[in-house]
Amino acid sequence: MSVDPLTGTGAEYRPAGPALDINVALDAYKGPWSPRLAAHLLRRAGFGGSPSEIAAAGQAGMGHAVDRLVHFVPDSLPAQPQGDISYQFGPNADVMQRRRAYVLTGLWWVNRMLQTPNPLQEKMVYFWSNHFTSGIGQGGISPQMMVNQNNLFRSNALGDYARLTHEVSRDPAMLLYLNNNQNRAQLPNENYARELMELFSLGVGNYTEADIRESARAFTGWTVNRRFGETAVFNPRFHDDGSKTFLGRTGNFTGDDIVDIIMQQPATAKYMARKFARAFIYDDPEPELVNALADRFRAARYDVGVLMNVILRSNVFYSDRAYRAIVKTPLELVIGAHKSLGATRVEPAALAALDRMGQTPMRPPNVAGWPGGALWVNTGTLLMRVNYLNQLALAKSAAAAAGNTAMGDGATMMDDMASQQALRMPANVADPSQWVSGVKMDDPAGLTDRVLWMTVQGDATPQQRQTILSYVQTDSVGNKVSLSMENFEEKVRGAMSLAFALPAYQLS
């Protein structure tokens, strides 16, 4: 499957299933509500739900569950990474300190994804960071700049898209990433002006090269002051205050004027509507659906909260075509698994795993961000994804592993792997007995169903269920065994690992 590395296009796949009548696709869903649909909502509007969160959303009903996601409450999570994230730039930079700063910054964000009481807010931070892309360490962007940009996205998560575009245009990380800090009246730099239109608002085909040149002149004058808090500063001496002609209008435009004119173009709402549809409904959305969402977005004056309210309550969002139709990003996969297992924090090992899966937080591949979709899974990354989930399910404390003397001739290969992985992964997940709380020791079928519910909400074929049940009931050579105090934990961990490997778990 080919993809344009700059625009991320060319890799789209519309899921199977009948399309909804566009006249009712965005109407509020009034069908049956269930924990299974509640889990779908939490996967799309967050990074998945723990069993208790899914149960609460299921009991609340669709309307109240969406209300709870859309209306944020203040959280007490750190607004900054814990520890020193500064380092000196240049050839004499302390490489270890720089690496430590990157790790602290990445951990701060992924732990916010796991621990936040406002999952939709954090999901929108991810959405915006993959839209208004910047990269830590690129062009001199410091970890603190990326933290500040991340918090900018958080404070505007469901706010006014036009206002956010204005603020991003003078964000220090963005000024450095797209060279707008080098944009001078005497020597215009067109990078930011080009990407603003191509990737951040209008889309290709809705502007000309002359529009890029003229808008670049309007954005001249902004620089980054590293001496005083790495702030953005406007220097009038560097600004081109001459007349410019942009999208058919002429005036002494500034960068703010350019953004205002862009927001008046119907193409902007349509471009953004398609991005929202791909991120939250399904890949390659029908043009009629995109147009309907664009109409809603323009009518709401680019209020993202209004648009997300429409999407998360709509018939199309809960349709068969949308259900498990999007490949999970590595971040969704990792954070969701932590939630399923009752983890309280994300450890540094997860950052290394995310890197191997192709998604290093705050370090996207290029200005187009991560293309996503089906491109997240290939023969290499699928192995990385399954291996990490396997390690997470089998991880336990080193002390527990050392005290495990039950590994004898009857232990299965999966059981042996559990003891090996125990020394590689930190233990911050809940006790496996809590994963299957309420399941009786002599009920292997109940244990299997409970594990399948926790992972894929029962979305498994009879054959897949039988494979896990057979593992629970047999040893490594196929002899029938009973669940006991000696093998219960290992069987639960192994069953969880097998469930994580199901194709359904790779899909949101």
Image: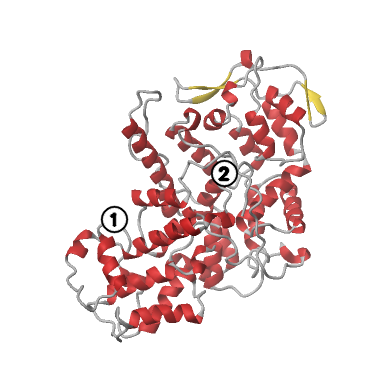
Q: Which residue is mark 1?
A: 426
Compared across the picture, whether 297 is left or right of 411 comes to right
Q: Nearer the viewer, residue 166 or 9?
A: 9
Looking at the picture, does residue 135 appear above or below residue 358? above
Residue 246 place in picture, x, y as percent = 77, 28
Residue at position x 19%, y 75% in the image: 408
Kindly tell me whether residue 306 is visible in this rendering.
no
| SS at badge 2 | loop
Counting labels gives 2
In the rendered image, the residue lying farthest to the top is 237
Q: Which residue is mark 2?
A: 369
Colour scheme of the picture: secondary structure
Q: Nearer the viewer, mark 2 or mark 1?
A: 2
In the image, what residue type sits under mark 2?
Gly
Quadrant housing the N terminus: bottom right
| SS at badge 1 | loop
In the image, what residue type sits under mark 1?
Pro
